Amino acid sequence: MTQTPQPRREFHSGRGRKTFDRIPGGFYLVGALVILFEVVMLGAVGLALAVGDPSGAEASPDKRSRQVEVTYIATGDHPSVDLTVGEADSHVPYGVAILPYRKTVTLATGADFYLDVRSREDQEGGTLTRTVLVDGKVVQQAHSTPDSSSATCTGSTADAPQRGIPVPTLTPGASPLPEERRLTETVKVRDYPGQGSPVIGTVTDSSLQYAELGGTWDRSEPLDPVFDGFTRKQEGRQRALVKSTQVDEDIMAAAGGTGELRGVAGAVMDERRRYDYPRDQAIRVDVASQPSKVDGYDAWLLVSEIHFHRRGVPSTMDLNAVLVVDTGRVHPSVLWVVLPETNKKLWPDLNTLVASVQVC
């Protein structure tokens, strides 16, 4: 049986014309170009996402500043120094730093560093060393000279390391000073062991009479109280001293002006610390404070350790004793004794002197 072929189905618009026949031929070319542009743009966006933004955190080192670790080190034979540290254009005084000092900061490559270390007042001289490390390697080091109490390190973090310069050992060059301590209770003076110095005579001064010591002590001699503050003194080995006088108006005022002997003894001790030791850098640690009687007159004995650091002085602590005696005069009399820790053979002399005091 023969089949009759079906006629091809055609699409027409409402008006009966062929829909595709109504599209101009040039529109096909424009559409193809639009599609090609979109494909290219989508490919570029995908590539950018895969590679990443070169301005972001994953940028190569060449596109951002490299950071380095800078370490500032200060060492020396002082317990503390005045220190200034930072970048060369923005450094500020750090203040008082306890040695040894070490601090690490992060700076940009090529940044300028600055480190200045100076001896504090009354501690001039000695040995001070300043060192700057960049990424653990020494790039600058400076030392104080005998005629200078400071030195400065300045340079760039891009400077080449200096060979053969070791990193300083961070061990204290001077033992730290102890905390201040004032006794408010009664603590009796100890009996210091040893033979002590011989007694070769007596000294009479300011209504007091006490032993004159021999051995390594020089003879007692008079002083001008206007210039020395005392009227008699005896000098011993390694800065040992025995001095006597009457308590002046300024010390009485510092003690409150009441004449209370404990307060007067403390005021005398503070005055001697202020005038005979590095200013504001000597620490008073009381070890004994007790009432006493001298020939029936009221007295007070104060014994303190004065801790300090001073260039050229081997002792870092002196035993100081102040005996204040109310002799019945307008002002009490005082005996002041200094015995250095470097010559403890003289420490029994304190007991000898205190026991020998009489009122005359």
Image (tube, helix red, strand yellow):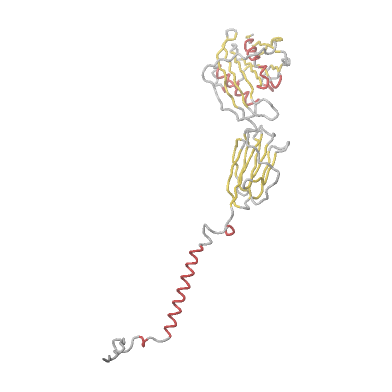
Could you say which is closer to the camera, residue 351 or residue 196? 196
Could you say which is closer to the camera, residue 84 or residue 191? 191
Q: Position of residue 238 (x, y in %)?
A: 70, 22
Q: Quadrant of residue 210?
A: top right
Asked if one can make out residue 165 in the rendered structure from this viewpoint, the answer is: yes
Report whether 274 appears left or right of 14: right
Kindly identify the residue that appears in the image at 48 percent across and 73 percent down: 40
Q: Position of residue 19 (x, y in %)?
A: 34, 86
Q: Quadrant of residue 116?
A: top right
In the image, farthest residue toward the top = 295
Q: Quadrant of the N terminus?
A: bottom left
Kindly identify the residue that appears in the image at 55 percent across and 24 percent down: 181
Q: Position of residue 212 (x, y in %)?
A: 69, 12
Q: Position of residue 327 (x, y in %)?
A: 60, 11
Could you say which is closer to the camera, residue 205 or residue 339? 339
Asked if one can make out residue 330 in the rendered structure from this viewpoint, the answer is: no
Relative to 11, is 195 above or below? Answer: above
Relative to 294, is 157 above or below? Answer: below
Q: Quadrant of the C terminus?
A: top right
